[in-house]
Every structure is written in C-alpha cells, then in structure tokens.
Image: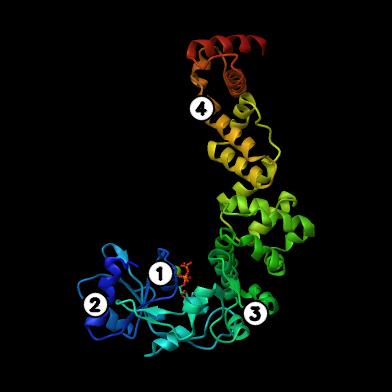
Amino acid sequence: MVIPGNILYALSALTKKGYEAYLVGGCVRDMIMGKTPSDFDITTNALPEEIINCFPDKKCVLSGMKHGTVAPIIKGEAIEITTYRIDGEYKDSRHPEEVYFTKKIEEDLSRRDFTVNAMAMDESFNITDPFSGKADIENGIIRCVGDAEKRFTEDALRIMRALRFSSVLGFSIEEETKKGISKLFPLLSNIARERIFTELKKLLAGTDAPCILAEFKDVFLFIMPHLENVAEEKYIDNVKRIKGCDTAISFAILFDGLITDDARAVLNSLKTDRLLKDTVIRLMEDKNADFSDIVKMRYFLKTRNFEDVSRLISFKEALGLMTENEAKASLELLEKTSSSCTKIKELAVSGSDLLSLGISGRKTGEILDALLNLVIEEKCENGKDALINAAKSLGDKC
Ligand code: ATP
Ligand code: MG
C-alpha cells in the first residue's frame, strides 16, 4: 500500500500540530482491496480554520468550507480535508438540513453509507473500523451502516450507490440492505437525475452489471420507465450482454428493442450529455448497417468516423449480431480504409477548383459528392488531374 507523498504531507501537517488525521472512505476501501484509489479524502478533528492554519505556506481552496472541507494545494493538487462531521436531520431524502462538526472519528464514520466505505486509516496504516467494514470486504458484502431503511430514507442516492458498488466491486448486497432497496427505491424521484446518471454510468461499467440489472429490474424500470417497452426476456438477454463495454455501447445494448424515440426520452430524462446521447442513438440506428466489403465500408465512412465504426463493431459483437471472427475481420477492413479518401474534404480537389470549370453553386456539392463516390469505388484515383477530368465529364452530363 502506497500513500502518495502529498497526501502523507497533508496528514503529517495536521498530526504535527496535535490533531488527528485519517484517510477515509473509498481510498481506504481501495487500499485494503489492493487497488489504487482514484482520490484520497482526509478527515480530521481540526476545525476548518484550524486546518487552514496547519498549511501556512499553502494556498487553500475554501469553496467547501461551509461543509467543513478545506483543500490545501500541495504539489499542484487540491487535497480535500474535512472536519469530522455528523449530518443533521434529513427532510427530503437528499440533503441534511444542517451538518455539525464532531470531535469523534467514530461519529463521522457512522454517517457514511456502507461499512466498506466507513473506515479510517492513519499515516501508519492503522485502521479504525467500528462497523466491521474490513470483514465485509473480505466476504464481499455491501451493507448499510446502521438501519438500511433509515439510511435510504435519509438519502435515496445511497440506493444507486449500493447497486453501483455491488456491480463494480462484485460484492453481494446484504439482506436488510437489499430489502431497503426494494422497498424504498421510489424515493429516487427526490434525487437529481444527473446524480442518478453518474451512478448508473459507473454501475454499467462494473463486472457484475448483468446480475444487478437483472435482479433489481424494478429499480431500473423506475428510473428508465421506457424500458417497460422491452419484453421481459429481451431485457434479461440484453443485460447479460453488458460486460465491460463503454457507456454508449452499454446503453445501446440496454435499449435494444426500443424505438430510438424512447431511448432518446430516457437519455433526456437522465440529463445525459449531448455527445453520449448522439452516440447511443447512432449505434441504435446503425445496427443493421452493411460494411461487409471495402467499398461498403468506405461508403459508410462518408458520414461516420473511425471511432463510430469501431464502436459499432463492438456493439454488434456484444449483441451477438457478429461473431468474434466477423468482428475481427470488420476491424481489419476498417483499418485498411484508414488511408482511403472517404470525405469530400479529403478529395484532391475543392469547390474552388471546380469554379474554373464553370461549376458553381448547388452543383458544386453534387459534383464533389459524385467525385467522392468515384474515388470510393476506385473508378477514379484521388489526384487533381484525374478528378478535374472526371468533373468535366460529370459537368457535361449535368
Ligand atoms: P469512488 O471510488 O467512486 O470515489 P467513494 O467511496 O470514494 O467511491 P465518493 O463519492 O468519492 O465515493 O465518497 C467518498 C466517501 O464519502 C464514501 O466512501 C463514503 O464514505 C462517503 N459518502 C459518499 N456519498 C455518500 C452518501 N450519499 N451517503 C453517505 N456517505 C457517503
Ligand atoms: Mg472517492
């Protein structure tokens, strides 16, 4: 287990001044599991003003100060340090009314969502683990800290987080936690769609996504009601195929059997970004595209780029529309076209070259497109003289 230098620096800046300081949450979980954490969170009994005073020669980001977070910039990185906190009463399954600082690490750990996320580790790797998170990691279990129903009622996003961690870590969900999810998932209507989507995206990338999507179908139908329009068996078949795919492919697989309007409605309701939405819809529309020989592949590339086609091949393979060998052959074909001209802008002539032949206006586009088709079909080489000659005869015919 390695703690990065700037994190160690932050921990010891606090402990040198007599405060307690721990790594906490996901980074502790990941280190215990032998994974490299994506980020490191530090918690301390120092109050925000006191944290600032521990870093006299560092600039501190103070935007999270109201919630107890100060982030000194150490070696170019903002390191988040948060005062031990307990949450006040929750009124809307979303935000606590107030947060309170506390002097006890155990109290801070008790507000955290799951036992595996409720451990703290000091700079000498000693672990504080009041809810047996380490044992739950060893046994592969996601379990709420405290009463599951109460915790999900406080913050319904935890429902999505439980499913996400189960999918990503490959852990099973403990019975009470599971019951809480099945009973309380309608509370997700109180949660911002963007936050649900963030969890869903991570969930879809998890190794256990197929099991979670199958077992908790009710939850997924609740957040994506249009999936009701996919037949039961088809849904189960689809979700089995979502394995380590990128986000767009995963959604396109999940939506297979839906009309694109429904898919678009789901993605709109989840407030996904435009790029993802367009990519998913394009995959769905291109599902039956024919790119079985080099000319067809080039024609297809007139309106698509290399990544689109390579993603489409993975999508078709995941759906079982292509065998592994067929997908490999299509990728090789795609590679072969990388030196081909498939776009008007790649032609050796442009509109201004056509002007000297008396071709202008709307005609220009038509002739350039016809020239591109000739090049694609290898009826004309992509050289200026050859294309000008071809343009002349095309111009004469028009
Ligand atoms: P990741 O690897 O995705 O970053 P993480 O466990 O670090 O996973 P974060 O969202 O970064 O998740 O949150 C950091 C920690 O804050 C969690 O480990 C958990 O202890 C606590 N936490 C986050 N969200 C909640 C929540 N909704 N309810 C309770 N505790 C939470
Ligand atoms: Mg994290």
Would you say 128 lies left or right of 232 here? left
- Find ligand 2 in the image and state its quadrant: bottom left
Q: Is residue 129 left or right of residue 308?
A: left
Residue picked out by circle 3 = 175
Give the residue pinned by disc 2. 13
Point out the tag, 2 or 3, that comes first from the N-terminus.
2
Q: Secondary structure at mark 1?
A: helix
Distance between mark 3 and mark 1 Cα atoms: 26 Å
Instruction: Give the amino acid at mark 2.
Output: Ala
- The answer to whether one can see residue 203 in this image is yes
Q: Residue furthest bottom?
A: 103
Q: Which residue is mark 4?
A: 345
Separation of marks 2 and 1 at Cα, in angstroms: 22 Å
Q: Nearer the viewer, residue 70 or 177?
A: 177
Residue 73 seen by the camera: no
Marks 4/2 in contact by CB < 8 Å: the verdict is no
Tell me the quarter of the picture where residue 393 sits. top right
Residue wearing tag 1: 31
